Image (spheres, rainbow, N blue to C red):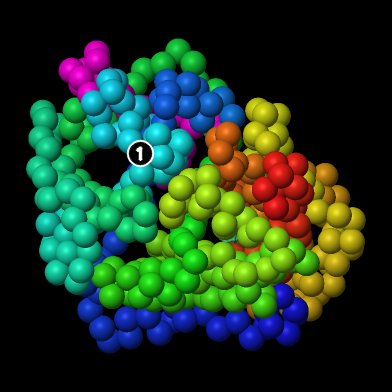
Amino acid sequence: MSKKEIKSVNYGLEKIFEGAQDFLPLLGTDYVEFYVGNAKQAAHFYKTAFGFQSHAYRGLETGATDSVSYVLTQDKIKLMLTTPLNSKSPINDHIVKHGDGVKIVALWVEDARQAYKETTSRGAKSYMEPTVEKDEHGEVVRAGIYTYGETVHMFVERKNYNGAFLPGFEKWESDYNPPAAGLKYIDHMVGNVGWNQMDVWVKWYEDVMGFENFLSFDDKQIHTEYSALMSKVMSNGNGRIKFPINEPAKAAKRSQIEEYLDFYEGAGVQHIAVATDDILKTVSQLRANGVEFLSTPPDEYYKSVPGRLEEFSHELKEDIEKLKGLGIMIDADEEGYLLQIFTKPVEDRPTLFFEIIQRMGARGFGAGNFKALFESIEREQEKRGTL
Ligand code: TYF
Ligand code: FE
């Protein structure tokens, strides 16, 4: 994306819901649930590599017979890792088809019944009717709808609930507690959808969830010499929830989105962006813990950074040599700058990965980094023979 194009970016957020009622008020992301082949080992990985903390547990010891779930937290982030305990569980089908991946993106609401009613009456396909769960710590109401692929949005209402996580879970006390890595909250979660499906899902988020299109990137902006994609960022009314949607675009070689769709065998969550307020510290720690990141952009990339910041009169507070040493990328727009870096996929299938992001005023998604980022992804595709 050229500097001129970046300048012309027009954030739509200010005009969202001007005068209109938000029919789906969302308080934030509640939890993200992964279906995995071995939750015990996955939990160890997220603790050791990403600094998540043991939080809650449901399994044979707590009376569960079909599946086991571990809940991990880091500041506001809650991850749930679930694995089936026998061949009859439908969770198996999800894992057989998609490999390990995100099943549920749960959203925190005041009224789960209302959220379910508003969305299903606008055409959402039901996953779970409003269900009340109770224990001695109070009551939680949950209801779910399908979004792209087999992915689900669960509405979670936790009025007066003061238990560890959800009814059925117990506090997970572990003797193994590696230090946190400074991850604070989920900044955005991205979905990959099939050919020509982006606008279908943009309309779905508009009509069913009341979201608005916050930013768009077409294949003329998002491409390298070889591959291309298109992306539209959807945002809810208060801007707390941001879901970019990607689709592949035709180009000389296989788009990374196409690679994802082939290996995930359908649409699904592509990356989870987590925010930190000290990316140098966070990334140093994650690297020391063995987290694998995409290769560092070339020298020319870092040479162009000061000019890009100057263009918008922002002063970089971090040492550029340190950012370069860790492979962290820098993008700027009129509102500020942002620092970001991407992990390699965290499974053997080239599917889900993480982004670490620190926002220094910028509300964009790093469009100025797209080229360097996608070239880095292509180097990985090349190694896999999937470009
Ligand atoms: O969320 C975003 O839009 C950025 C950039 O396949 C991005 O993190 C976009 C597409 C993609 C990987 C990263
Ligand atoms: Fe992102």
At 10% from the left and 43% from the top, the residue drawn is 132
Q: Which of 270 and 116 lies nearest the eye of the viewer?
A: 270
Q: Position of residue 26 (x, y in %)?
A: 29, 61
Quadrant of the frame with the N terminus: bottom right
At 70% from the left and 41% from the top, the residue drawn is 384
User: Tag 1's secondary structure?
Assistant: helix
Q: Is residue 221 visible?
A: yes
The residue indicated by pointer 1 is: 94
**Residue span colored magenta:** 50-77
Asked if residue 67 is among those painted magenta in the image, a careful observer would answer yes
Q: Position of residue 310 (x, y in %)?
A: 81, 74
| Image-quadrant location for residue 126 | bottom left
Q: Which of 65 and 228 lies nearest the eye of the viewer?
A: 228
The amino acid on which the numbered mark 1 sits, given as a three-letter code, is: His
At 63% from the left and 74% from the top, the residue drawn is 219
Q: Number of labelled discs?
A: 1
Q: Which of 355 and 100 lies nearest the eye of the viewer?
A: 100
Asked if residue 351 is among those painted magenta in the image, a careful observer would answer no
At 16% from the left and 42% from the top, the residue drawn is 140
Q: In the image, 156: left or right of 356?
A: left
- Characterize the local packing of mark 1: few (<14), some (14-19) or many (20 or more) Cα atoms within 10 angstroms: some
Q: In the image, 208: left or right of 308?
A: left
Q: Position of residue 148 (x, y in %)?
A: 36, 58
Q: Position of residue 146 (x, y in %)?
A: 27, 55
- Residue 373 vs 215, above or below: the answer is above
Q: Is residue 331 visible?
A: no
